[in-house]
Amino acid sequence: LRKDYLQIAVPLYEASIKCDWKAAKAVIDKYPKMELVRYSITENGETALHVAASAKVPKKVEGFVENLVKLMTKEDLALENENYNTALYLAAAAGNVEALVLGH
């Protein structure tokens, strides 16, 4: 489990917080059976979409989210973190709602 965290969750989190799609896609593609778009990558139960939605790199959020959403189902988009917040809620709180709505 710790190995998964270090090899998967940490790199995916780092790519998501920077909205580095190339790096995120490399991690997602490396573990295709793990459904990483649904994978919790923080202690708070957040997915890559949750992390990117609240990222502080506005120029990159939209493209990252758009690419990530293409890999997700409607159910994936509704995933909540441990505080019952969806990625859309976090995007609104961070001022990134336009990027997330456009990504849908």
Image (cartoon, rainbow, N blue to C red):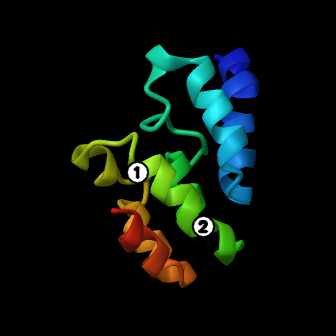
Give the x, y percent position of residue 14: 75, 47
- Is 94 situated above or below 70? below
* Residue shown at 50% from the left, 31% from the top: 36
* Residue shown at 54% from the left, 84% from the top: 95
**Taking 45 as reference, is 60 left or right?**
right
**Taking 57 as reference, is 96 left or right?**
left
Number of marks in the rendered image: 2
The quarter holding residue 52 reads bottom right
Answer whether residue 93 is visible to the viewer in this image. yes
Task: Say which residue label 2 marks.
Answer: 61
Task: State if disc 1 and disc 2 touch (CB < 8 Å).
Answer: no
Q: Secondary structure at mark 2?
A: helix
Quarter of the figure with the C terminus: bottom left
Between residue 64 and residue 3, name the one nearer to us.
64
Disc nearer the start of the sequence (2/1): 2
Q: Residue furthest bottom?
A: 95
